[in-house]
Image (cartoon, rainbow, N blue to C red):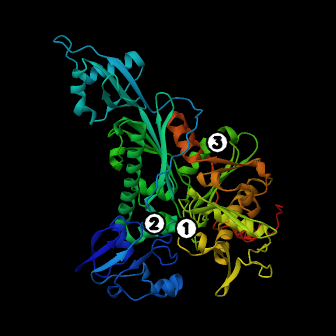
Amino acid sequence: MSRITITIYPWGRKIRARKGENLLDILRRANIYIESYCGGAGTCGKCKVRVLNGDSLSEVTEEERRLLGNDELRSGQRLSCKAKVFSDMALYVPYEFVNHYPYTKKEKFNIKSNLIPAVKSFRLKLSPPTIDDPKSDMERICESLSSLYGVRVSRVDPICLVDAPVVIRKYNWDVEICVWMEEEIIAVRPPFGKGLYGLAIDIGTTQLGMYIVDLKCGEIVSSGSILNPQVRFGEDLITRLNYIVKKGKKGLFEMNRVLVEGLNGLIDRLVKEANISRSEIMDVVAVGNTLMHHVFFKINPQSLAISPFVPHICFPFNIKARELDLQVADTAYVHSVPLKAGFVGSDTISSITAVLPDLKDKPKLIIDIGTNGEIVYGTEERLLCASCATGPAFEGGNISHGMRARLGAIEKVKIERDTLNVTYGVIGGCKPEGICGSGIIDAVSQLFQAGLLDRSGRFIEERPCERLRKKGEFLEFVIAWGYETKDGKDITITQKDIRNVQLAKAALYAGAKILIERFGGGKPEKVFVAGSFGTHIDLLNAYLLGMFPIVGLDDIIPKGNLAGFGALVALLDRSMRNEAEKFAKKVKYVELSASSDFRREFFDALYIPHAKDTFL
């Protein structure tokens, strides 16, 4: 197959490609990751590039004409997922259009947990062998562990045997032994100067969260998150799953490689921040939704793509980090928290264990808002769970001027009821480029409160307002005028944007309502909103939009990253791994897609705030 050369400005890159390949695949391979919410399906219009010599590309498609418009097409812009290249060409990809996977520090918090980690270290001063006492090194270590600490190990990681003889003699038989679960020796180290750390990983659809904790004292020493680099394959789970179904094992391994590279990059940043080495991370706990879990552990997820949408594996297990190419101590284990069913993964089970003390007595509702919404309802004695596809609207996807919560995103919107004047807040305080999830929720809720939307979500055209205008056959509302924005174009909320927000919030509300009804009715004592998204949204605007079943506003409590917190607890107290397994078996999964009740509740919840329930 003939090869061609693509020159990319202003990056100064030259890339070899196959004739007939589309530009999005070429840029992905070159590690230039343009936003593509739809995963290359040609429906989101985000993967725009500017062609400097257009004769070498395929004809403009109908999707491009619809999503770009004549002005952008005349300026040389194309959708990289639809443009195929047939000869050498030059391409302009502005830096600001590209995902750089920015690093964000995560909050540190005090963990109230027993300190019983899976990995412990023991100081041993061994007697050296003699002619009369020729026992092997490992025999001496095992006997000393048993007699001094009551630890009876049954095996040794063979990698330990490479350096152990040298370390033992170099330090005159004074060594530190690291033992996993009081079963396996995983390190023979010098008697001082080495730390003992654990790593908690939360593999989200959009974000990779990570915490490093000192296993000797329980203190979090560094934490952070980055955008999940798998977004290049699509924003939502279904798009990524379809990629694997289409590509087979090659797609699975490609997605796994990208994920592990992202995780290793984040580990590298966090160990430098904590001033420790990778080899000091001796234990790992990983959680994630079902698809992310399967991809991370190289488990083929194709069973999730066909009815009845079951995981390939649900029970917990342990695997060596080296088998996953995770760059921590070679001998460290990675513990997989159990899954429940369908798309209710180990992140949901981890969230349950994180709030166990709160689940006594009266029922609580846990909602994790993201591209896939997970919901749990009940008490410690009885729990129900479900998963609902909210879509990427809350992350800025499927929104005309939507973007992720990064520099330049409008994150807060206020519309005055009387004057209809708009004020907004932008991340970084700079000129806005688009609007992120929290800003979208604000905007739709504020439009309703200002009397510009009716309860069905339609614009009220009769309300005089210069910001409300027609574009083609549909209405849109201007949040920021072109003279205020970075690219000189108006940032608007369209009727289609409002519909996408309605679909997302209705799925979340209806799923929660079904669980409450199946539990026996009533209402939750508290609603815990999990995930970083819940800590950034304006709860009043979300409440008036109709995202949560009826409780008092004061009873809706942002809880932050519950999944990551649960993983941390499992690192510090290994008994919580058994608790997670117990609750994974106890919680009952409710399949919403097959429920006629869900469809009824969903259609009612499309209204703002709701067709029947009163919020105001």
Would residue 210 be seen by someone viewing this image from the given angle?
Answer: no
Which is nearer the N-term, disc 1 or disc 3?
Answer: 3
* Numbered label attached to residue 355: 3
Residue picked out by circle 1: 433
Q: How much space separates mark 3 and mark 2, taking CA atoms?
A: 40 Å
- Horizontal side of residue 179 vs 406, given as left or right: left
Looking at the rendered structure, the kind of residue marked 2 is: Glu
Q: Give above or below for 387 relative to 603.
A: above
Nearer the observer, 538 or 500: 538
Residue picked out by circle 2: 96
Residue contact at pointers 3 and 2, CB within 8 angstroms: no
Specify the quadrant of the image occupied by residue 598: bottom right
Which circle, 1 or 3, is nearer the viewer? 1
Nearer the observer, 524 or 464: 464
Label 2 secondary element: helix
Looking at the rendered structure, the kind of residue marked 1 is: Glu
Q: Residues within 10 Å of mark 2 (few under 14, many from 20)?
A: few
Q: Give above or below for 566 relative to 370.
A: above
Residue 110 placement (x, y as % from top left): 58, 34
